[in-house]
Amino acid sequence: MTDRLTIRRPDDWHVHLRDGAMLEHVAPYTARQFARAIIMPNLSPPVTTAEEGRAYRDRINAAVPAGLDFTPLIVAYLTDHSDPDEMARGHAEGVFTAAKLYPAHATTGSAHGVTDIANIMPVLERMQDIGMPLLIHGEVTDHDVDIFDREAVFIERTLAPLVKRLPALKIVFEHITTAEAAAFVAEAPANVAATVTPQHLHINRNAMLVGGIRPHAYCLPVAKREHHRLAVRKAATSGSPKFFLGTDSAPHAVHTKEASCGCAGIFNAPYALESYVTAFDEDGALDQFEGFASEHGPRFYGLPLNEQTVTLERGETIVPDRIGEVVPFHAGETLGWRLV
Ligand SMILES: NC(=O)N[C@@H](CC(=O)O)C(=O)O
Ligand SMILES: [Zn+2]
Ligand SMILES: [Zn+2]
């Protein structure tokens, strides 16, 4: 039995650090574990220009405690009015690592998102030409589609046609939650990959709804049935280079979650590595953890692997009920691994 695991320092390929006081509060948790992170741009207002991206990067760097080695990778928020030249300029100047497609009104902070993918086709064509990755919140927003089906329907209606139309575009299907998504990505060409969150490895929809409604288990895409959780877990622990770590840590103040209309998002940053490694351990896949956490992501993005290491060991991690104004994922639980 492995009791200690030393791996290359991981990166988080999908995280919400927010802005202002929340940024100050949450950035240290991400920076102490991860060397780099893809920072989601769904601020209000969203990060749409290279100039806004640069200013946001400065604010993030100022919020990271001195002595922590951490590089934020900034992402452009695509709107119906995004300009191919502005995207290409931001990418060439090293501000925008990627661009994010939020279907309008699909999730938190997506009101300025794209109403029809046809509106951004010139931008996507340019991104394909310059090798700039497209990150996707993959859910349709049609009112006649059940919330539990929105990811699978997105594959049929939007993602599969997009991959056909722009076969060389680098695409990350973010925070996958279904067997359909895991299968689609596994069978797609090498330029299509996916991130997987800790919550979608650990919980199914019962966690949200059994014994009372549990707002801190609510995020988007919403957790699905158990067979979907198992399929996502199998993909993550398979060793396939198409699946990599992206926490989707999405902090919301407790009063905005525990409300008649609560916000979507789970704050998992503080114990992200302990949470992931627990799932890999349960599946007898500790030997696949370094690939998932530290190698597949940088290889997909064309970035160097980190040279520093981190060590995880078997031992108790007690997750507190609250961290400031935010309830963390696994609140009140004890995890069987700790970050040394
Ligand atoms: N995942 C979530 O439930 N919420 C995210 C947005 C997102 O990633 O969809 C947020 O910004 O709060
Ligand atoms: Zn999302
Ligand atoms: Zn997210």
Image: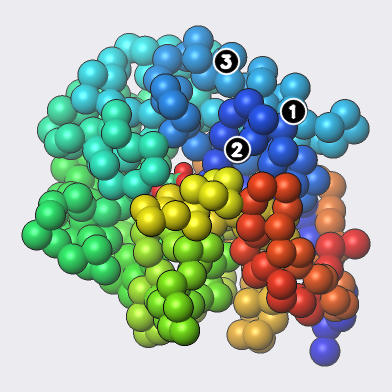
Which quadrant is the N terminus positioned in? bottom right
Q: Position of residue 237 (x, y in %)?
A: 56, 74
Q: How many marks?
A: 3
Residue type, numbered disc 1: Ala
- 228 to the left or right of 256: left
Q: Position of residue 265 (x, y in %)?
A: 48, 53
176, above or below 2, in the image: above
Q: Position of residue 36 (x, y in %)?
A: 68, 40
* Mark 1 vs 2: CB contact within 8 A: yes
Which residue was labeled with disc 2? 17
Which residue was labeled with disc 3? 54
335, above or below 10, in the image: below
Residue 53 visible at all: yes
Tell me which numbered mark, 1 or 2, is placed earlier along the sequence: 2
Q: Which mark is residue 210?
A: none
* Disc 3 element: helix
